[in-house]
């Protein structure tokens, strides 16, 4: 997790909290948190990064739409992050 950007970490949380969201679903959810529009040039390269790190799985819903799902490594990464944060948040 220490080599991820905050945005990539937030993507993991969004994907973990959804059931196989599409890229558009992830975009809409993350925009609510960031309170501004996230363009494709920011979203998809960062999704590709978390896929390349085996934290997220990418699959095809149809010819035009991909879905994303958290992997076991991704879940473990989030768990370790939450444990680390909890020592500071009490």
Image (cartoon, rainbow, N blue to C red):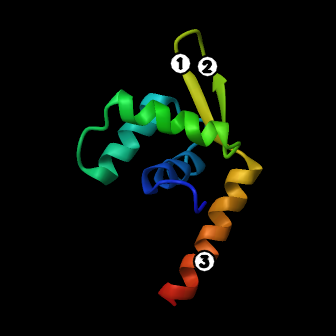
Q: Is residue 15 above or below residue 25?
A: below
Looking at the image, how many numbered discs can be counted on the residues?
Answer: 3
Q: Residue at x 39, y 44 (%)?
A: 29
Front: mark 3 or 1? 3
From the viewer's perspective, tell me whether residue 13 is left or right of residue 33.
Answer: right
Residue 78, quarter of picture: bottom right
To which residue does mark 1 refer? Answer: 65
Q: Residue at x 33, y 53 (%)?
A: 33
N-term mark: 3 or 1: 1
Image location (x, y in percent) of residue 27: 39, 36
Measure how far apart labels 2 and 3 are at the Cα level: 35 Å
Marking on residue 84? 3
Mark 1: few, some, or many residues within 10 Å (few <14, many ≥20)? Answer: few
- Quarter the N terminus occupies: bottom right
Q: Secondary structure at mark 2?
A: loop
N-term mark: 2 or 3: 2
Marking on residue 61? 2
Image location (x, y in percent) of residue 69: 64, 39
Kindly give the residue lying farthest to the right in the view shown. Answer: 72
Mark 1 and mark 2 residues within 8 Å of each other at the beta carbon: yes
Image location (x, y in percent) of residue 39: 31, 32
From the viewer's perspective, tell me whether residue 25 is left or right of residue 74.
Answer: left
Kindly give the residue lying farthest to the front in the view shown. Answer: 3
Kindly give the residue lying farthest to the top in the view shown. Answer: 63
């Amino acid at each position: 997790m220490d080599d991820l950007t905050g945005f990539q970490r937030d993507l993991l949380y969004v994907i973990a909290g959804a059931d196989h969201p599409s890229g558009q679903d992830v975009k809409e959810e993350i925009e609510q948190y960031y309170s501004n529009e996230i363009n494709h040039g920011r979203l998809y390269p960062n999704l590709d990064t978390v896929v390349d790190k085996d934290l997220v799985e990418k699959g095809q819903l149809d010819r035009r739409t991909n879905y994303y799902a958290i992997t076991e490594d991704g879940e473990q990464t989030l768990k370790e992050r939450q444990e680390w944060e909890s020592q500071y948040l009490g």
